[in-house]
Image (tube, rainbow, N blue to C red):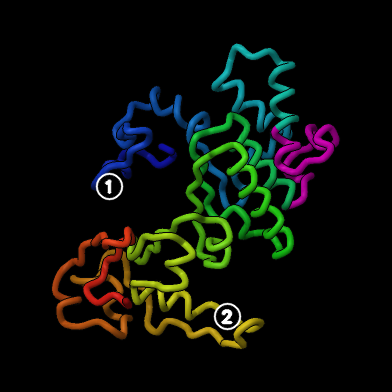
Amino acid sequence: MGLVPRDIVSKVSGSIEFDNTSIIDLPEHEMRKIRGKRVSIVFQEPMTAMNPLMTLYEQIAEVIRAHEPNLTEKDVACKVNGTLINCGFAEPGKFVDSFPHQLSGGMRQRAMLAMALVLEPDLIIADEPTTALDAGLQVQLLAELRDLVKKKNHGMIFISHDLGVIQSIADSIAILYAGQVMEIGNSETTLKRPLHPYTHALVESMPRLIREKKLPHPIPGHLPSPDRKPAGCVFSDRCPRAKAECRASRIPLTKREDGRSVRCLFPMN
């Protein structure tokens, strides 16, 4: 998204490509054409992401005006109202003049979704978008987000620590630990038959009291410090399957014949 200062981004190795274009070194004036228009983001806490001095209408209209300056104000208002309706505001006219502090948590989150979706971007980055909400509202909003993404044919990167949420919304999943991708695959298959010991440990740490009457098993040990990672596999100090080879050097991410990828010398199956 280009929201992080360039002097920090320049320290990242590798590349980030969008639509076959590397965006790490893209000039700011070119990045502005992508940010908000083709790639948008939904933050975890809307109260800190929204401008407290702008009404709901102005928050969303600002995005439209920045990328479509030739639209009339009537067209802008039509886009704002239509998007709010799609995002769960049955009567947007009652709320468009409200400031963020006058909206409930669920409404603020829907407003963030509207800001992200109003220009129908190719890609939405959703960063823990429902964590601050109660369980009932979380389920409702996730269902609405999933339906909107499919209806408009958006792509979505959904970032979450909740495996239950991921399983309900994602087609594919990448499991990360200490800044490294441990496993990539179809979300249902990966969570039912994990390859990496860390993915297996994550699944076992989830409470399953209703169907299986099974208590969670916490993962022993602690996450390594970012500046003191193990020389080999970053999970080796906590892994029950780790051997000397695992601690010797960095483990590559290997793609298997079934299309799944795993960073492990001794996968689960």
140 vs 19, left or right, is: right
Question: To which quarter of the image does residue 25 belong?
Answer: top left
* Magenta extent: 83-105
For the point 25% across and 71% down, which residue is it? 264
| Residue 91, magenta (yes or no) | yes
For the point 30% across and 74% down, which residue is it? 235
Disc number placed over residue 212 in the picture, else none: none
Mark 2 Cα shell of 10 Å, populated few (<14), some (14-19), many (≥20): few
Mark 1 Cα shell of 10 Å, populated few (<14), some (14-19), many (≥20): few
Above or below 106: residue 193: below
Q: Which residue is mark 2?
A: 207
Please tell me which residue lies in front, 268 or 24: 268
Question: To which quarter of the image does residue 114 belong?
Answer: top right
**Is residue 180 visible to us here?**
no
21 vs 94, left or right, is: left
Question: To which quarter of the image does residue 17 belong?
Answer: top left
Q: Which residue is mark 1?
A: 12
Where is residue 134? Give x, y as percent: 71, 63
| Residue 189, magenta (yes or no) | no
**Amino acid type at image mark 2:** Pro
